[in-house]
Image (cartoon, coloured by chain):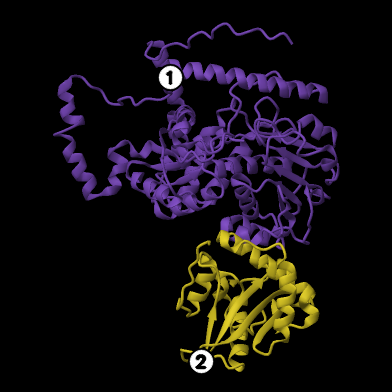
Chain colours: A purple, B yellow
Amino acid sequence: MAQSSPSPIDADRGGRRKARTAAERSEDQTDLLGERSLELSRYFAGKVETVPKVPVRSLADFALWYTPGVAAVSRAIQADPELSFDLTGRWNTIAIVTDGSRVLGLGDIGPRAALPVMEGKALLFKFLGGVDAIPIPIQAKSPDQFIATVEALAPAFGGINLEDIASPKCFGILEELQKRLPIPVWHDDQLGTAAATVAGLLNALELTNRSIREVRTVLLGAGAANLVTARLLLTLGLPAHQLTLVDQKGILHGEREDLDELELRNPWKYRIALKTNGGGRTGDLRAALEGADVLLAASTPNPDTIRPEHVRAMAKDPIVFALANPVPEIWPDVARSAGAAVVATGRSDFPNQVNNSLIFPAVFRGVLDARARSIPDEVVLAAARELAHGAAIKGLTAHHLLPTMEEPEVFPLIAAAVGDTAVRLGIARRKLSHDEFLERATTLMGRSAKLVRALARARLTPPMPRAPGRKRRSR
Amino acid sequence: MNANTESGASAGGPGESPSVPIHLRPAREADVPALVPLLLRLKRLNEEFDPLLRVRDDADQQARQILKADIANPKAVVLAAEGVGADKDKVVGFVRALVRERPFYAPEHEGVILDIYLLPLYRRRGVGEYVLRETSNALRSKGAGVVTAEFPAQNEIASRFYTKRGFRPITAVQARSL
C-alpha cells in the first residue's frame, strides 16, 4: 500500500460496472507505466546523483574542501563526535537500506533488483522532504548480518530508513537497530503506513462523531503495517478488548492452533493475539465484523476480499479503509452502497488516499532538523495527528479525510510537529522553537523543487524523452 | 519432550500468589479427551524445530493411550491445569513426567519432564514457575533426586525457561536419518 499511483487515472466513481472498468483500466495503466519506466531508466540510467553543495572557484579550493584543510575538520570531530552533525552533511543525510526481501508486491527479489525502488524512494525523500537519501541495498545472509552492516554504516548518517524488508523479520531488525543506533531508525512499511492510516482514522472518527475509546475496530491483515497500526491505536486509547485482528486464518485469538508457532516465529503478532479480541470471538472476517464500527484492511489486493455483506454486518455508518494496492479489498462505491459512511483506499484516483508519502518526507525533515536520537511512537503519533489536522482545518467531509499530495503546505507543519515532539521528549540534539522548525522545513522542503527546475532549465538534466508512439487502445 | 510455558514466567513470583490464573491437580482418566489436543499442540510445535520430529498420523490415538497409561502409572506424574474463576473446570494445560532409574549415576532416580503445555492465554504471571515447582515436588515424593527436562534442541524458549531456573544441559541427544 506504500506506493501512490504516479498519476491519477480517470476512474469513474459511479456504478459497480464502471468501477470494474476502472480496475481494468488501472491494470492497463500499470503496464504502460511499467514500459515507460523501463525506457526512462535506460535513458537516464539512475534517478539520483551527488552534487557538490559548495563553490569551487578554482582547483585551489580543493585544499579547503579536501586535504590538507579538511584534516582540521576531522580532528574537531575526533575530539567531539557530535560535531559530525555540524561540520558535515550528516545532519541531512539518511540511508535507505533494504535486503530486497519484500519489494513492492514483487516479493523476495534481492538487493540488486530492489535498487531502482530505493533510488525512487531517494528521489521522493529529496524532492518532498529536502532529505539527502542514499539508496543502499544490502546483500545479507541473515537478519543479524543485515543489522551489523547497517550499524557499521551509521556514522555517516543522521537517520536510517528501512525499506521493503519482509515481515516478521522487519520487526526484529527495526527493534534491534533502534536499540543500537543513536539516530532515528524508521521502517516505512510499518511506521509510515501505520501513521497515515491512524491519521485517516482520527478524522473518520471525528466525522462520524465517535471516540476511539468506544469504537469496536477490526484490522484485516496482520503484517508490518497493521501490527504497528494496532500498537498505535492501543497507545491512543483504543481498549484492547475492542480490537480484533483477522488474517488469512481468520480471527487472531489466544487459543488459535498456530499460536505456539507464532510465539516462536512472530512474537509481535503473538503478543497482539493475547491482548486483543475481548469476548473471545472466533471465526472468519464476517464474525469479527459483527457490530464493528471500524474496518482497517491492509491485506491482499483483491476487490472481493471484503464483500458488501461484510460491511452490512457492521454497526451503523461504519468506517472502511481498504488499503491494499494496487487493488483495494473492496471498491469504494461498493463499500458505500453497502452502508459505509467513510471509505479510504491506498489509491490516488479515489478520494481519501492513505499514502505514506504524506508522512515519511516530513517525519524525516522533522527528526533531522531536531537531530533526534531516536523516533519513538510519540513522534509517529505527532506526525499522524498533524496530518489529520491538516485536513480538518480545511473542513472534513467523507471525501476529504486526508490532505492530498497536492496540498504540500501541510508537510512543513508535520515536520515542525515532529521536531517539537522530539524536543519535548528530550531526544533532540538541537532544540529549536516551533517557528524555527517550521521555517527551516519550509525552506528545505521547498528548495528541492527549485533545484530540479533549475537543473532542467540549465539543461543539466536532459528533458524527458518523448514516449515512442503508444498504441491507441480501441476500447 | 518439550516445555512451553513462557520465558517471562519469572516475573510473577511465588506460585501460590493469587495472580496465577491456573490451578494444578492430578489428572484423572476423565481428563484424557481434554488433554489429547493439548499434547498434540505441543508435538505439532515440535515439528517446527526438526523434520525428524514430524508428527505421526496416528499421534492422537497414541496420545490417548499414553496419557491413560501414565495417569494410572505410579511412576508417572500427570497434572492437569485448570483455569480459575470463570475458567474453572476448563483444562488449560498439563504436565507429564516420569520417574526413571539411573543405573550408573547418583542420585539413582530422576524425574523426567516429558511434556509441559499451557494454552498461551494462561502463561506468564508466574505460571511456569508454579508448574515447575509443583511437578518437582510430585517427582520428589516419588523418589526422584534430580529433575530433568526433555525438549527439542532448537527450542530456545524452553531452553531459556529452564536455564533461568537453574537447569543446565547434562546429556545431549543427536540424530540423523537412516
- Which residue is label 2 attached to? B108
> Disc 2 and disc 1: Cα gap in Å?
82 Å
Contact, mark 2 vs mark 1 (Cβ under 8 Å) = no
Q: Quadrant of the N terminus of chain B?
A: bottom right
- Which residue is label 1 attached to? A452
Q: Quadrant of residue A19?
A: top right
Q: Residues within 10 Å of mark 2 (few under 14, many from 20)?
A: some
> For the point 55% across and 44% down, which residue is it?
A191
Name the chain letter of the residue that bears numbered label 1.
A
> For the point 48% across and 50% down, which residue is it?
A173
Q: Is residue A197 above or below residue B151?
A: above
Q: Whole-percent x and y of residue A344?
A: 71, 35
Q: Quadrant of residue B46?
A: bottom right
Q: Is residue A65 left or right of residue A91?
A: left
Q: Whole-percent x and y of residue A364?
A: 47, 39
Q: Whole-percent x and y of residue A81?
A: 27, 48
Q: Is residue A258 above or below residue A349?
A: below
